[in-house]
């Protein structure tokens, strides 16, 4: 006696172990096989339904595929329903068995029963192969223009599958779209719009032919926007938001890059933007699609401002999903109308303080895109506040971005230096060769900034900073502009808490950097170079013997690079006739754009800067500097 599906489910749930479940399933499979062999047609649909449940549990059921075909060939709707369900679950388009069902599909498409025709369309739309689509396309086309809206919508959805499998048939359905759009049934309109979008994706050239339906779509959207309460289509006070969204998407495709079509849409888009209620999620979905359509087509600037203002209203919504969507969309359209987005700058900046990390990240991306020369100081201040509070894993990325923004848009050089120092002071683990290069380029190319930057960076050095980029910058500037450091304090620095340092104090501070366990090898190379440069900057001061002593200490260093530099610098100290020329100031240079190779090198922790003689080894003079100095002997052995 065959048990019902409900009883099988109850028995499976009662199993306490996997072994019990397998035994239960195997017993039932044996019973189903026996029923199939006995050709028991009365209970075949029940057995196939149980087979589908067994398939959902993960057990093999391929042996029951032919029973699905027998059910489909039956005359009763109950049998066909289970048969088509089994066909779509147990088979796919790659199965050769599927060819056996093609004749049944054709007969069912011609059935007078709308539900049987709907089942056939559903099966074709889910698992049909290219051959079946090509053979049954004429039958589906006939159903599309029938008087029954239930069958028409099923046929329209089925034709989407046909177009995906046989793109060459797209011309067949173009004329049928106009008939579908003339229907007053919302389901038919919705499926016809999906068919139109599939046509545009399959064959972009079809967009030009489909533009003749623009006025029909606009009229349909206008009726939806201006119509009164319709209980059968109402969703939270909005008339069929699904259809409105689909029409707006189609208008976006038709109007993109076509001024004449876009002009027809201006009025209806303005009506949708102003008349749609934003208190419910359905209205927000329509407004969002309206904004995307306005920003994608050729419209006047006033309409674009209206669209961006809608996104601005989204930003103050309590729903985080809506705020996220608004930030994401504003970031995409900021390039089209940056001035309109700037009006919502304060609201965007407030999103940096949100508790949701995804909101903060999107707001950060948008703020970064909004920065320009006029607002760089205000926005960088907000970014610095966010840098202090943000999670540790985001600090390095944010620091890099702040440095890039300041470098790109800053017009005040002193503010530039102060901001970079403040940013690096917050992100103690940040390390970037690019930032070091850009700051050195700025300082060397701006003579009026050199004293200010040197004193500011020395203050960080004296405060025992552990930030690697600040250490390298401070050491480099002390070595390059040491005579400015021990001179008077420049304007702009508070002299009540800071005074020009003593040369000995400077050298001792550099010596402490060399002894520091946190200073990496590149920083120590910078420091050794700085000490060598100070032999000319601090000439005639009591600090000179201390410098010589520090340089000689590392002649026996375990680091080959430090040892070699120490020995070579010791020899150079004896060559007074060329030492002044070799240790001249670095000439001004412009920062080079980073290449992909440099980016990868930085990411792997390798610093090519330490190997660049023009930056990290200034003790070796460039060719123009040597030429300007006194001519050296023909050959000099620095190690002799």
Image: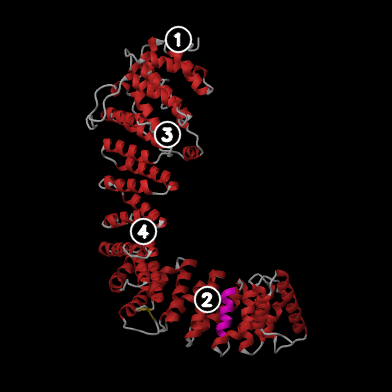
Judged by depth in the image, the label closer to the viewer, 4 or 3, is 3
Q: Disc 1 designates what residue?
A: 634
Relative image position of residue 211 (x, y in whole percent) = 38, 71
Provide the secondary structure element on which disc 3 rests. helix
Q: In front here: 342 or 546?
A: 546
Q: Is residue 625 above or below residue 108?
A: above
Per the picture, the main secondary structure of the magenta-coloured stretch is helix
Which badge, 1 or 3, comes first in the chain's sequence?
3
Q: In front here: 6 or 631?
A: 6
Cα–Cα span, label 1 and label 3:
40 Å
Cα–Cα span, label 4 and label 1:
67 Å
Cα–Cα span, label 2 and label 4:
37 Å
Q: Residues within 10 Å of mark 3 (few under 14, many from 20)?
A: many
Which badge, 4 or 3, comes first in the chain's sequence?
4
Q: Disc 3 designates what residue?
A: 468
Residue segment shown in magenta = 117-126
Q: In front here: 628 or 89?
A: 89
């Amino acid at each position: 006696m065959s048990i019902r599906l409900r009883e099988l489910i109850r028995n499976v749930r009662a199993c306490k172990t996997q072994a019990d479940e397998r035994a239960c399933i195997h017993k039932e499979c044996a019973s189903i096989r026996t029923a199939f062999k006995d050709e028991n047609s009365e209970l075949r649909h029940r057995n196939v339904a149980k087979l589908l449940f067994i398939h959902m549990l993960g057990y093999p059921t391929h042996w029951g595929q032919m029973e699905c075909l027998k059910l489909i060939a039956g005359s009763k709707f109950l049998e066909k329903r289970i048969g088509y369900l089994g066909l779509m679950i147990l088979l796919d388009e790659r199965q050769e068995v599927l060819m056996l069902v093609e004749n049944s599909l054709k007969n069912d498409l011609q059935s007078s029963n709308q539900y049987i025709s709907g089942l056939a369309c559903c099966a074709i739309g889910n698992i049909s192969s290219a051959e079946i689509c090509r053979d049954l396309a004429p039958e589906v086309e006939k159903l599309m223009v029938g008087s029954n809206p239930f069958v028409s919508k099923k046929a329209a959805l089925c034709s989407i599958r046909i177009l995906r499998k046989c793109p060459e048939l797209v011309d067949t359905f173009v004329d049928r779209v106009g008939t579908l759009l003339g229907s007053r049934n919302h389901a038919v309109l919705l499926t016809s719009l999906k068919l139109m979008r599939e046509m545009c994706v399959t064959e972009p050239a079809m967009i030009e032919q489909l533009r003749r339906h623009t006025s029909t779509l606009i009229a349909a959207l206008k009726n939806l926007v201006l119509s009164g309460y319709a209980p059968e289509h109402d969703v939270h006070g909005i008339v069929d938001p699904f259809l409105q969204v689909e029409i707006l998407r189609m208008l976006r495709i038709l109007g993109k890059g076509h001024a004449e079509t876009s002009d027809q849409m201006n009025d209806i888009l303005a009506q949708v933007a102003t008349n749609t209620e934003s208190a419910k999620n359905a209205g927000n979905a329509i407004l969002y699609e309206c904004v995307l359509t306005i920003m994608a087509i050729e419209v006047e600037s006033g309409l674009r401002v209206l669209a961006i203002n809608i996104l601005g209203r989204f930003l103050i919504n309590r729903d985080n999903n809506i705020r996220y969507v608004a930030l994401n969309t504003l970031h995409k359209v900021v390039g089209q109308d940056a001035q309109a987005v700037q009006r919502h700058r304060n609201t965007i900046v407030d999103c940096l303080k949100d508790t949701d990390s995804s909101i903060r990240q999107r707001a950060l991306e948008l703020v970064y895109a909004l920065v320009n020369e006029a607002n760089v100081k205000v926005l960088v201040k907000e970014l610095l506040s966010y840098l202090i509070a943000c999670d540790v894993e985001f600090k390095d990325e944010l620091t890099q971005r702040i440095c890039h923004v300041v470098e790109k848009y800053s017009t005040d050089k002193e503010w530039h230096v102060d901001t970079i120092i403040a940013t690096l002071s917050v992100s103690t683990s940040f390390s970037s060769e690019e930032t070091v290069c850009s700051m050195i380029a700025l300082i060397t190319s701006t003579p009026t900034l050199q004293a200010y930057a040197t004193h500011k960076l020395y203050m960080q050095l004296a405060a025992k900073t552990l930030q690697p980029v600040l250490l390298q910058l401070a050491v480099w500037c002390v070595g390059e502009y040491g005579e400015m450091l021990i001179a008077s304090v420049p304007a702009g620095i508070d002299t009540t808490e800071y005074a020009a340092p003593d040369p000995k104090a400077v050298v001792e501070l550099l010596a402490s950097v060399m002894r520091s366990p946190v200073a990496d090898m590149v920083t120590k190379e910078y420091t050794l170079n700085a000490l060598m440069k100070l032999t000319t900057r601090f000439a005639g001061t009591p600090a000179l013997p201390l410098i010589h002593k520090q340089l000689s200490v590392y002649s026996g260093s375990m680091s080959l690079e430090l040892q070699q530099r120490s020995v070579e610098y010791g020899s150079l100290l004896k060559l007074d006739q060329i030492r002044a020329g070799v240790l001249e100031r670095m000439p001004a240079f412009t920062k080079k754009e980073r290449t992909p190779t440099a980016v990868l090198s930085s990411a792997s922790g390798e610093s090519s800067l330490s190997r660049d003689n023009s930056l990290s080894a200034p003790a070796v003079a460039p060719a123009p500097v040597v030429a300007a100095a006194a001519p050296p002997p023909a050959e000099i052995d620095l190690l002799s």
